[in-house]
Amino acid sequence: MEIVAAIGAARHAVRTRRPLIHELTGSVTANDCANITLALGASPVMAQALPEVGEVTKKSSALLINLGMLQPTMLASLHRAARVAVQEGIPLVLDPVGVGTTAWRTQAAIALVKAYKFTIIKGNGSEIQCLAREESGVYGGVDSLRKVLPARDVQHMAVKLGTTVAVTGAIDMVSDGKQTYMLQNGCSMLTRITGTGCMTGALAAAYSAVTTPLTAAVAAITTMSLAGEKARKQAAQAGPGSLHAALFDVVYRLTAEDLRRDGKIRSVSL
Amino acid sequence: MEIVAAIGAARHAVRTRRPLIHELTGSVTANDCANITLALGASPVMAQALPEVGEVTKKSSALLINLGMLQPTMLASLHRAARVAVQEGIPLVLDPVGVGTTAWRTQAAIALVKAYKFTIIKGNGSEIQCLAREESGVYGGVDSLRKVLPARDVQHMAVKLGTTVAVTGAIDMVSDGKQTYMLQNGCSMLTRITGTGCMTGALAAAYSAVTTPLTAAVAAITTMSLAGEKARKQAAQAGPGSLHAALFDVVYRLTAEDLRRDGKIRSVSL
Amino acid sequence: MEIVAAIGAARHAVRTRRPLIHELTGSVTANDCANITLALGASPVMAQALPEVGEVTKKSSALLINLGMLQPTMLASLHRAARVAVQEGIPLVLDPVGVGTTAWRTQAAIALVKAYKFTIIKGNGSEIQCLAREESGVYGGVDSLRKVLPARDVQHMAVKLGTTVAVTGAIDMVSDGKQTYMLQNGCSMLTRITGTGCMTGALAAAYSAVTTPLTAAVAAITTMSLAGEKARKQAAQAGPGSLHAALFDVVYRLTAEDLRRDGKIRSVSL
């Protein structure tokens, strides 16, 4: 199946199957993650207490681990949930927010990546590079978040990490180590809203419950980028507050046909 | 006083008395709970640290305990606040989010219900059944959230739990064990926004500061359901993001007269 | 430079320099704080785990400490971050939410104020009075939040606390102990949205990265008040939900010229 047909089918499948998505995220963007999951048609469950986290993962169709507001007390819950996901064959998505910015955060993220086979790792170029090289210090400030990595590097990082990587930036890239895609939708105002990256991770988890990792990663990024483009039109005279609200509207209405027609997805030959 | 007159009077009373409502909720929906409380005209206070939580409850006119993001470290705060509420005669509302889904959560909720006399317990059919039967395992996935219980069962659960129960679903029901109401307002898109249930709990707490438990529970559900209906019209071309913002607008403007005229409230004879 | 020229210049400087602002805030308003920071043109970082908090502060251009959802476990992080800020000469803003309402919270806030030289302390009249007098019990309920203190008292509190104080209320006042300003913009519906005070604190931190404490405090309050006025027009038929979203739109678009032309700022001679 062509990638555009596959992401359209995945969009439809989320809406009809309503998979339960377990999302372990921080307090800053948890509400947004839950709402974008609902807008897509899936059902979020956010419980993260250690005595119940494994039981919740076990009932879910995908698990998202987002490190944005990581706390030492949360690490045990993340490991327990990840272990259950691997044991049960539940897709496991990592959003390593801010990895590379501090030593402790970097070590915690690398420990997770070494311990569990993630289905998708989604981050900006700095974050994914940090995980692939197992070193911090590559973080170059907020501007580095938008830097574009060469497609060859992205593919190598996917091989190195043994997973599908979704690298967001001015141009987004997805690779499972064999197949690599460049994604060119987007809206620059999304960078003026907190949590759009976290929401992309939540979408990746929701899609991973119904399709392959590669398709899920492409679908997630394309959904958020197209939502940004379309919301920008809906909220044209306004700004990031209106755009933020409009994102949920657009994702809710976004059809398989929209993704197929408007997704700017290019397969990269390497 | 007829129920429609009573809920209209309660709407007016919240706006004029501005009761202080202590809300112990999780991070996913705390912002929404605080904002819906403000929109109704009451004042939320969200502090939950153990060294101060009792002092805050003591100054408040109602206490909400929402178990959505329950953590072991939060249990001591919940118990201390509940104990103060009971001692001081402050209305005490429980929103047992997700009870029945895990063993630990179920035990924690049952322990609270056994230890304190709650003024109102608001939940979906699965949650209230789980508490009334003191057993988990009745949870049947997300679709069970909308199932409609027979009015007789709801009344029996109110008697069993010794409280006013507010059972949300495709049709909502409220009973104090003697009087039972069916509430038929609503908007299905509310299920595509996280926290609408939590917000209903916050409204129940705010109303409980100014009226009887039965009236408060009916008023809370009718307020949220009518807000959904009216917001749907305001955000007709849009989706859950616009609807979410519009809920606060509608609750803010909603008058006693709106509730009296548009509330579909039917007393059930058993 | 005249104050209106200075706040205009500061508005411009935030947009062009995009300072990294470290914000230690609670879960209720963290999303709003991050989004208002982005709307102004700065970049928020919200990490608060003890093993990394100092490292994050060290890379930042300003630090905000907001006590809204204070927890005993968070105190060590607040102290470590504040110590780094003082050592590194990074502007340090305190938003002592709710100080005076409980004994524990009051002691925690006073301990912070005694231990570190804050650049700006922003609060309502009750909160600032409590800190200046080092006593609780002055809290008179929610209505006290809007009381207007005499300008002379505000100036004395700035001298006593050795900082720039920003006192919000029906009329806002800012003083560094020498120069005092009365600020008369605003929109009463802002009090029906949670977190508008917290967002003002985040704006103060962002401005403090690019200008003097006195200018930063005036700019922050004027930005939020003008945003309320302008958002009220954008959301005129609506209510607090629409106003909330519109705040981010207006702050995003707000120009140096808007601040200079529409800011009602009066220097007070004492």
Image (cartoon, coloured by chain):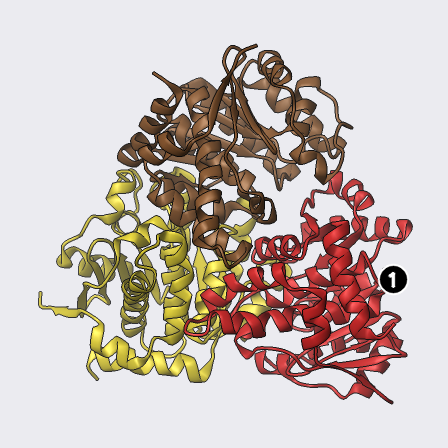
Chain colours: A red, B brown, C yellow
Quadrant in which residue C41 is drawn: bottom left
In the image, is residue A117 above or below residue A2?
Answer: above
In the image, is residue C157 above or below residue B68?
Answer: below
Within-10-Å neighbours for mark 1: few <14, some 14–19, many 20+ = some
Quadrant (top left, top right, bottom left, bottom right) of the C terminus of chain B:
top right
Which residue shows up at 31% across the image and 33% down it? B257
Quadrant (top left, top right, bottom left, bottom right) of the N terminus of chain B:
top left
Q: Mark 1 points at which residue?
A: A117
Q: Residue A75: horizontal and vertical position, in percent?
A: 73, 53
Indicate the chain on which mark 1 is placed.
A
Which residue shows up at 28% across the image and 61% down it? C166
Foreground residue among C54 and B108: B108
Which residue shows up at 37% across the image and 52% down it? C240
In the image, is residue A88 above or below residue B7?
Answer: below
Quadrant in which residue A86 is drawn: bottom right
Which residue type does callout 1 highlight?
Answer: Lys
